[in-house]
Amino acid sequence: MRWSLSSAMLVAIVLPLAACKVASTPSSAPPAQGAPAAASTAAPAPAAASPAPEAVTVRWGGQGVLTDSPVYVAMDRGYFGAEGIDLQYVNFSSASEIVPAVSNNQLEVGAISPNVATLNALARGVGVKLVADRGSMRPGHGWVALVVRPDLVESGRYQSPADLRGLRVAVTPPVGATANAVAVARLLDQQGIAPSEVDFVPLPFPEMNPALANGSIDVAFQSEPLLALGIRQGIAVREVGSDEIYPNQQIGVVSYGADFVQDQPDIARRFMVAYLRGARDFVDAFAKGRDRAEVVQSLIRHTPVKDASVYDEMVATGFNPDGYINVDSVASDQEWFLAQGKIAERVDLATAIDNQYVDYALGRLGRYQP
């Protein structure tokens, strides 16, 4: 499906999504594949926990991106404070930098991806646990998508993904080692195109729109809200979402460090309650319009996109409001990385993924009710 929004003039994009390691205080969907089925009874009101202790500092490592939305909302609506947590947001330039920070217990919680860096760290037995969903390609939530320069579409050079052969395609680095790389490989395979027939250009998401605008790349796998911004500015035409290429792929996960799990188990459980409340508010805002303006203000406050109307045009991130990770997707991606020689050994996902924190949160909040 192809669509675009033109603006009066082409605006150059200056959106530094993440500064390196600077602390700041800044229709329902079905359950994700591999998650327990939702109950049909009405959800109870959030149960009261035991009195919260004096606020404990918990450091979250993120990138100032949309997949951290549950944290932004939970911070701004006081959900962490209600659980006795003083959340400190620590900004990183890439998810691959967050993995060692969590592994070395420099962070209690990290926003990471089930990619090569994560799987290699887990294979080394670092004690990191994958504990909750942080964004997947739930059908209708293609918040990462293939976009093409408009001039290539207008000239007829690009008419469908079958025309990717010979084009310069921007993907997030490292090439072939990210969760998005698996979706890219699937798309090429569907078109009978060998990876060697495409010129991959490694670029972070914020650099993709400027590269499309100046013609240094032809195609990009771009993420929201930069995706919607590029379309609005007339420098990108949306072609196909990752939710169509690889439905329900698990893109982001919440991770806990070993010391956090061992030394602060009650805080780890309370964190998940606050996080899941933030995720549900995000889902409700974009699926039902509930408190949408307030939620959008949180996104404006904590991400570089400050124009509220862009959030009206974007495709919302797909969060599992019951929090469970799509284990089948992570297992499938791990097999692809193994086949490509990107990882040397298979991780025992039954050990690496720990559902007890989501289980606790659901015990207090109940299952999500559409």
Image (cartoon, rainbow, N blue to C red):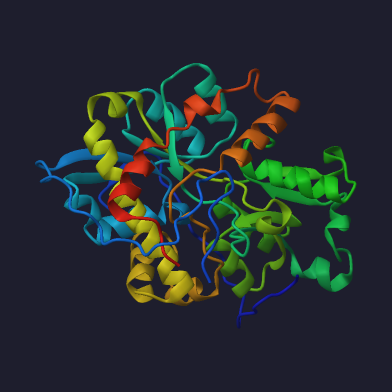
- Image coords of residue 231 (percent x, y): 63, 71
Residue at the image position 56 percent from the left and 46 percent from the top: 251
- Image coords of residue 21 (percent x, y): 36, 38
Out of 68 and 289, give the one closest to the viewer. Answer: 289
| Residue 72 in sight in this render | no
Out of 137 and 203, give the one closest to the viewer. Answer: 137
Number of numbered callouts drawn: 0
321 vs 317, left or right, is: left
Image: 365 above or below 104: below
Image: 43 above or below 253: below
Which quarter of the picture shows residue 141?
Answer: bottom right
User: Which quarter of the figure is the C terminus placed in?
Assistant: bottom left
Residue at the image position 75 percent from the left and 70 percent from the top: 1
130 vs 114, left or right, is: left
Residue at the image position 60 percent from the left and 54 percent from the top: 137
| Residue 74 in sight in this render | yes
282 vs 45, left or right, is: right
- Image coords of residue 16 (percent x, y): 47, 53
Out of 310 and 318, give the one closest to the viewer. Answer: 318
107 vs 13, left or right, is: left
Out of 315 and 264, give the one closest to the viewer. Answer: 264
Residue most extreme to the bottom: 8
- Image coords of residue 44 (percent x, y): 29, 61
Residue at the image position 61 percent from the left and 67 percent from the top: 230
Which quarter of the picture shows residue 298?
Answer: bottom left
